[in-house]
């Protein structure tokens, strides 16, 4: 318990430092307008939620990978894991919420020892639309995970999987040596039980994040290239590709600063700002729940320690009516969700 408290204090201190970086410099001296300035111009400040559709629950930061762009700072050394007691509190909310989708994320959510129990209980509680955000390699990481494709199929889980590129070099550079080969095998395992096939209802979508300090390309064109390459080279099929902008927080912000790309990247985000994306940002229809049950407008705010602006702070005191009347908490990282065609956990928003 003491180690967990010390780790949380350390993470909060880091989050405060990152918020200070985002709020100072080019924004504090007026070189760039703040995100608040930009959405005020179009009458969207304060940003307000629409009807809640998605509960996104982070069941733990533990992961079998250490990806250089990860906004969660996930890895094998992370011990933050949602307990069954907190999961039970989430289940009580699931029984009454107006949200129709349960989106489970991590780390590698499958590494939570109560992951399968939680999925089964959520199904009993009435959730029909499941999303599990899998890094793919977890399926091949240990024999105890080899049956995950069958488990996903049993519960008709929508699998959203990270896949940096269709080539070994670019994938392994971003996510670690051997990740590409394990990912290809995991995709074949998923295809074998019906996931990703053209006429199948078993949804398999891939996620692309840029490997450096640049914005993703056109999602439609990238999806076509991914599909052609994976089918031709490995006979692998999937449904959709989500191109997601890397937000300047956590491990990616550390990389931007260390590589001297921070200011250039922020200029790129602001220059690519699209006011049409603001009304569809994911924080409007999604509520993020951390591994310890605290509530956030999105999982990016979760990593910055920016809890919801509401008297309801924790899943144990959940009140959807009160939460629906809150203002959404924003900062400069929000430019990442409104750049170009916009970015969300479901890909572009425009």
Image (cartoon, grey):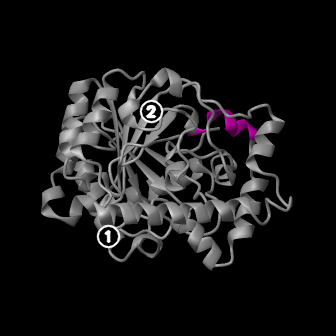
Secondary structure mostly taken by the magenta-highlighted segment of the chain = helix
Q: Residue furthest left?
A: 143
Residue 82 visible: yes
Q: Residue furthest right?
A: 30
Identify which residue is drawn at 55% across, 67% down: 252
x, y (%) of residue 2?
31, 64
The magenta segment is: 275-282
Where residue 199 sits, quadrant-wise, is top left
User: Which type of secondary structure does the marked residue at label 2 adopt?
Assistant: strand
Q: How many marks?
A: 2
Q: Residue at x 67, y 65 (%)?
A: 21
| Residue nearer the viewer, 10 or 78 | 10
Label number found at residue 77: 1
Location of residue 74 in the rendering, given as x and y in whole percent from the top left corner: 39, 63
| Mark 2 surroundings within 10 Å by alpha-carbon count, few (fewer than 14), some (14 through 19), many (20 or more) | many
Q: Which residue is mark 2?
A: 54
Q: Quadrant of the N terminus?
A: bottom left
Q: Residue at x 56, y 48 (%)?
A: 306
Q: Where's the C terminus, which quadrant?
A: top right
Q: Which secondary structure lies at badge 1?
A: loop
Q: Quadrant of residue 50?
A: top right
């Amino acid at each position: 318990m003491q180690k967990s408290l010390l780790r949380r204090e350390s993470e909060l201190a880091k989050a405060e430092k990152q918020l200070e970086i985002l709020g100072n410099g080019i924004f504090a001296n007026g070189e760039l307008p703040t995100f608040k300035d930009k959405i005020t111009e179009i009458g969207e400040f304060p940003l307000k939620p629409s009807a809640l559709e998605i509960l996104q629950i982070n069941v733990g930061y533990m992961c079998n990978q250490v990806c250089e762009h990860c906004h969660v700072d996930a890895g094998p050394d992370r011990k933050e894991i949602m307990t069954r007691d907190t999961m039970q509190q989430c289940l009580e909310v699931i029984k009454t919420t107006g949200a129709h989708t349960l989106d489970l994320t991590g780390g590698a959510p499958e590494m939570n020892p109560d992951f399968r129990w939680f999925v089964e209980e959520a199904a009993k509680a009435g959730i029909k639309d499941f999303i599990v955000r899998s890094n793919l390699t977890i399926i091949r990481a240990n024999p105890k995970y080899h049956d995950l494709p069958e488990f996903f199929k049993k519960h008709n889980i929508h699998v959203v999987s990270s896949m940096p590129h269709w080539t070994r070099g670019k994938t392994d550079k971003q996510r670690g040596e051997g990740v590409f080969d394990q990912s290809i095998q995991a995709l074949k395992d998923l295809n074998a039980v019906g996931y990703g096939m053209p006429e199948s209802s078993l949804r398999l979508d891939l996620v692309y994040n840029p490997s450096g300090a640049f914005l993703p390309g056109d999602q439609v064109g990238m999806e076509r290239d991914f599909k052609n390459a994976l089918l031709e080279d490995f006979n692998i099929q999937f449904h959709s590709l989500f191109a997601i902008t890397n937000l300047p927080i956590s491990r990616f912000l550390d990389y931007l600063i260390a590589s001297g790309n921070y200011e250039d990247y922020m200029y790129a985000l602001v220059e690519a700002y699209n006011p049409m994306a603001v009304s569809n940002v994911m924080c409007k229809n999604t509520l993020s729940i951390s591994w310890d049950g605290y509530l956030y407008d999105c999982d990016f705010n979760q990593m910055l320690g920016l809890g919801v602006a509401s008297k309801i702070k924790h899943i144990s005191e959940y009140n959807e009516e009160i939460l629906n009347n809150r203002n959404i908490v924003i900062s400069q990282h929000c430019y990442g969700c409104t750049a170009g065609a916009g970015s969300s956990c479901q890909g572009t928003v425009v």
